Amino acid sequence: MEILRVENIRRVYETQGKPVHALRGISFSVKKGEFIAVVGASGSGKSTLLHILGGIDRPTSGKVYVDGQDVYEQNEEELAIFRRRQVGLIYQFYNLIPVLTVEENITLPARLDGRRVNRERLAGLLKELGLVKRRKHLPGQLSGGQQQRTSIGRALFNAPAIVLADEPTGNLDSRNAEAIMQLLRSANRTYKQTTIVITHDREIAMMANRILEIQDGRLIRDEVIG
Ligand SMILES: Nc1ncnc2c1ncn2[C@@H]1O[C@H](COP(=O)(O)OP(=O)(O)O)[C@@H](O)[C@H]1O
Ligand SMILES: [Mg+2]
């Protein structure tokens, strides 16, 4: 089943009156449950692509469909709901809310949506992420690996259509990086959670089942590896 389709995405930024072609016509389709690594040199357009998939940055032209929904046909209010329910974002620097505890951060997407928090789901995630004893802690009291595990919990909490991670291990040592990738991979297997991870680490890219390589805003490789 197709969960994501990208049709001829272009993104042109304006800097000091000059156009910057961040994406020059990218198309691909993703089936539910895929685990994809996006690789490419710095400045090739990886983050721009991820933001466009996640409903954060509008393409200059082209279409994005998530679970059949034309993402950018929605108005701002619908887009905000789309981002909360259908997208789980993970960044290099965690982006947790510093005044909220681990469990408050993880359940934030549901609470922003005005929904009752599913305590069972929370308990299950805290266990899988190894955060049971840390659940009442604030982000500032956690290690980098624990903060990133919290942000994974937040990304997974609403069971979004797609999880998007931009260099999620970029700020971690190799042991923590490996653990973070294993958690993403196991969520991918357990919940058939479709996941797209930007990385410049070749070993981490090999954990994916498909690799997309971007060069100068173009897709130059789209290969299934496992
Ligand atoms: N908000 C922006 N305004 C202007 N140029 C941008 C903006 N965001 C990204 N770019 C430019 O678009 C290109 C792609 O950037 P980016 O997607 O961040 O690449 P990557 O994540 O692969 O390093 C770069 O040339 C970058 O400078
Ligand atoms: Mg980037």
Image (cartoon, grey):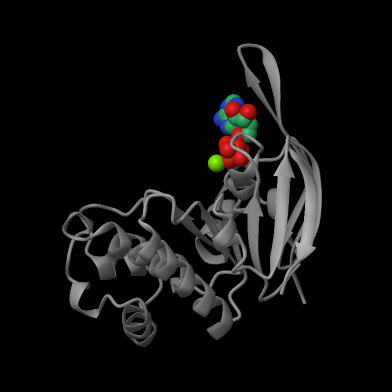
Relative horizontal placement of residue 201, taking residue 149 as reference (left or right): right
Quadrant where the N terminus sits is bottom right
Quadrant where the C terminus sits is bottom right
- Quarter of the image for residue 110 reads bottom left
- Quarter of the image for residue 104 reads bottom left
Residue toward you, 56 or 217:
217
The percent coordinates of residue 7 (x first, y second) are 82, 51
Residue toward you, 109 or 218:
218
Query: In the rendered image of this protein, does residue 24 appear above or below residue 171?
Result: above
The percent coordinates of residue 98 (x first, y second) are 23, 52
Relative horizontal placement of residue 8, taking residue 145 as reference (left or right): right
Q: What residue is drawn where x is 66% and y is 12%?
A: 17
Residue 186 visible = yes
Q: What residue is drawn where x is 63% and y is 59%?
A: 37
The percent coordinates of residue 150 (x first, y second) are 33, 65
Q: Quadrant of ligand 2?
A: top right
Query: In the rendered image of this protein, does residue 75 appear above or below residue 117?
Result: above
Residue toward you, 112 or 19:
19
